Image: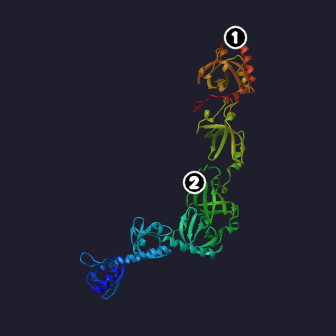
Amino acid sequence: MKDISALLDASLQSFKEGSIIHGTVLEKRAKEIVVDIGYKSEGIIDLDEFEQPEEIQVGQEIEILLERLEDDDGMVVLSRQKAAQKQNWDKIVKTFNEGGTIIGRVRKIVKGGLMVNVGVEAFLPSSQIDVIPPKNLREFEDANIECKIVKLNEDRKNVVLSRREIIEAQRAEKRAALLGGIEKGSIVKGVVKNLTDFGAFIDLDGLDGLLHITDISWSRLNHPSEVLKIGQELDVMVLEIDREKERVSLGLKQQSANPWEKLPEKYPVGTRIKGKITSLVPYGAFVELEPGVEGLIHVSEISWTKRVARPSDVLAMGQEVEAQVTELNTEEQKLSLSLRALESNPWDVIHEKYAVGSTVKGIVRNLTAYGAFVELEEGIDGMSPRVRLSWTRKVNHPSEVLKKNEEIEAQVIGIDKQNQRISLGIKQLASDPWSEIESRYKQGDLVKGVVTKVASFGAFIQLADEIDGLVHISQISEDRVNKVKDVLKIGQEVEARVIKVDRAERRIGLSIKAANYSDEDLEKETASFENLRSSDMLSSMGDAFDKAEEEFRPGEGKK
């Protein structure tokens, strides 16, 4: 009896809960099997725990996990599924420690990636599926994929996988092999991987090469997508190799003849050509002469006379045009064309139509700080500088005497054919009132006028024929005047005495306070004014205008 008890104790010690043991199938039922593990009682396992339950046979030996030796009914608690999980986990730990790979089946798509069955549930993040994260994860549903275990948590039984690391390692091997085997000028196969504004990236089976937009076609392209699409297979030429940085420059157009090499024979300078407009840009229009050959009509070469702000105002995409070749550079692949070269240049005979000294009519097209532009006919402008606008007024801006779109007459002063300029004068149509100023204004004359400008040193009074006279601050009143604007206002009519007439400097000196002087007092005041002649302030009427601190300009108000 003692021997039997000892044998039983030894038997019990060999059955360790949580361990994987062998058992024999005694009976197969509809939903379960009975298993003998050599213990005093049998265990029962659901058929659902087996991946292929139909293959289980009576008498078959299987591996199972011993969960408990006895439950409340005295039965042994066994699990085939947990045995497989424990075996798989041990395998996963070993694989992780050794840095190996494992194959699993994608079970489902979850937020942020995929759940993969590698014996246990494992997570494969989207960023680790491929070198470029896939846009559609459904293409991996139910697929068997090879991954590397990158993170393991034994306590939580968490497994994180990476398929990307395997792909990157494979690509690195292929890159090394490719870089070692290709040479400059080699023709290699690739697939368009990505398109950018500056070119296309080509996948050379593990190595990315750049196909620059200028090396795609002999024709000018606005974007690579005009001739390429992602996923397209290509034969490309290796142009440059940087093995250290693993960079490869590729070319597509280099596999065909360069049409520019024969252009000097086909389109010498001066040739009249026909072509189709393929692109309109702010600076001109591109014209295709033949496939791969385009010329540029610069905006300045569209018309001799029309002011073309944008080529699209006069030309259209797809329009057939005739032009003349004006410049050809095959090395830089530049072909310059001209539309206006096919027409006569009106500036060649401009002197016949607008002779120097003749009177012309035109419309004021533009007013600038330095003069007025007058349109004589479409595309032909003349310019009158502000100093030629009036004999009598100091014109600070043409808008003081002219209005835009106003029709005026002017005299042709000069013609510059080379720079296409016509110089005009408006005041030249009238006689210069200063040529006979001494006969109109004499020292001592009492005159009336209107204040037109106020400066820190005095005021300008407009007399008859728009002649200006200057009242110095000292000649305004017998009382001391600190600020001219406190005494005189723009538009105010005043009476003054002429105390100085200087034809050479085109200056008339006036005195308001001397309006009621006697002849003797007037002579004294005239002498006083003469002493101001040497001062910088009143050295000339022109200097007086330039030194003005407070002026009235039409449209600007007081300054």
Which residue extends farthest front?
2
Front one among 133 and 16: 16
Q: Provide residue 145's location: percent of width, then percent of height.
A: 45, 75
Amino acid type at circle 2 is Val
User: Badge 1 is on which residue?
Assistant: 518
Would you say residue 233 is visible in this rendering? no
Q: Could you give the CA–CA distance between mark 2 and mark 1, rounded to whole angstroms?
A: 73 Å
Q: Is residue 59 above or below residue 159?
A: below
Classify mark 1: helix, strand or loop. loop
For discs 2 and 1, the disc positioned in front in the rendered view: 1
Q: Is residue 418 left or right of residue 208?
A: right
User: Badge 2 is on which residue?
Assistant: 314
Label 1 neighbourhood size at 10 Å, few (<14), some (14-19), many (20+)?
Answer: few
Residue at the (65%, 51%) spot, across then down: 304
Amino acid type at circle 1 is Ser
Q: Is residue 533 left or right of residue 140?
A: right
> Which quarter of the figure is the N terminus placed in?
bottom left
Front one among 14 and 329: 14
Q: Provide residue 554's location: percent of width, then percent of height.
A: 59, 31
Q: Determine whether label 2 and label 1 are within 8 Å by CB.
A: no
Colour mapping used in the image: rainbow
Front one among 254 and 75: 75
Front one among 313 and 333: 333
Classify mark 2: helix, strand or loop. loop
Would you say residue 332 is visible in this rendering? yes
Q: Which mark is residue 322?
A: none
Q: Provide residue 208's location: percent of width, then percent of height.
A: 57, 69
